[in-house]
Image (tube, grey):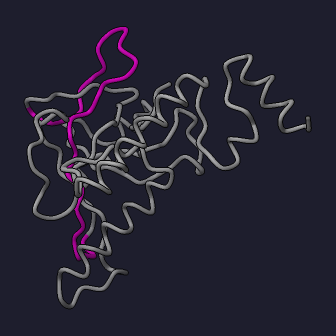
Amino acid sequence: MNDNLRDALDELYDARVPNFWKKISWGSATIGFWFSELLDRNTQFHTWCFQGRPNCFWLTGFFNPQGFLTAMRQEITRAHKGWALDSVVLSNDMTKMMREDVTAGPSEGVYIYGLYLDGAGWDRRNMKLTEAQAKVLYTSLPIAHLTAVNTTAVKDTKLYACPVYKKPNRTDLNFIFQLNLKTAQPPDHWILRGVALLCDIK
């Protein structure tokens, strides 16, 4: 028996993820949530390895989602002659589809799912931000189409650059990227409300 085993037994008894595991794994509220995420992650990677590229990716299932997005940018850069990776930036479009509606992947880029809006609601018909409904903490976002474009143009000021975080704890370590969302109000309206997208709400 050593300190790591003693700590692991104590944490498992209290239904928490052992501290030693967190050094080489991901954080989770309870060991039950951690194990269910493990099964979901395994399913995504097993499908990808043995059945081909998924039509839609669960962003939460990546230990390093930034690396996945960089690889997607590189793939698109190589597909276009004359493009340089330094000038290629992420771009996105929101769709009306949910995960079960996706039957094929996009011609370029990737579909992602599993994001939740914190601090706002989502108008699926008009595909834009709206005020959150009473007593609704998180709103599930439909499928987002992520791609990359070769541009140095100024960002559209009518879009809200919504930060995406791995966990509800909003720190630099949990920040992934920004997703541009349509809004009828000025972006400052949502900035003051602290609107963000979360991959995990547990």
State which quadrant residue 196 falls in. Answer: top left
Let me know if residue 196 appears in the view: no
User: Could you tell me which residue is drawn at 9 percent across and 33 percent down?
Assistant: 126
Front residue (pair 128, 198): 198
What is the count of numbered marks?
0
Q: Is residue 133 magenta?
A: yes
Horizontal side, residue 96 vs residue 175: left or right = left
Horizontal side, residue 74 vs residue 201: left or right = left
Determine the residue located farthest toward the bottom in the rendered image.
82
Let me know if residue 71 appears in the view: yes
Residue 180's x, y, as percent? Answer: 27, 50
Determine the residue located farthest toward the right in the rendered image.
2
Determine the residue located farthest toward the top in the rendered image.
135
Residue 55's x, y, as percent? Answer: 18, 50
Q: Which residues are magenta?
A: 126-153
Residue 137's x, y, as percent? Answer: 40, 18
Front residue (pair 180, 64): 64
Q: Considering only vertical position in the picture, is 11 above or below 145?
A: above
Residue 104's x, y, as percent? Answer: 9, 50
Q: Considering only vertical position in the picture, is 49 above or below 84?
A: above
Front residue (pair 47, 71): 47
User: Could you tell me which residue is drawn at 73 percent across and 33 percent down?
Assistant: 18
User: Could you tell me which residue is drawn at 8 percent across and 43 percent down?
Assistant: 103
Q: Is residue 74 magenta?
A: no
Q: Quadrant of the N terminus?
A: top right
User: Could you tell me which residue is drawn at 26 percent across and 79 percent down?
Assistant: 77
Horizontal side, residue 192 vs residue 95: left or right = right
Horizontal side, residue 198 vs residue 48: left or right = right
Q: Considering only vertical position in the picture, is 147 above or below 99?
A: below
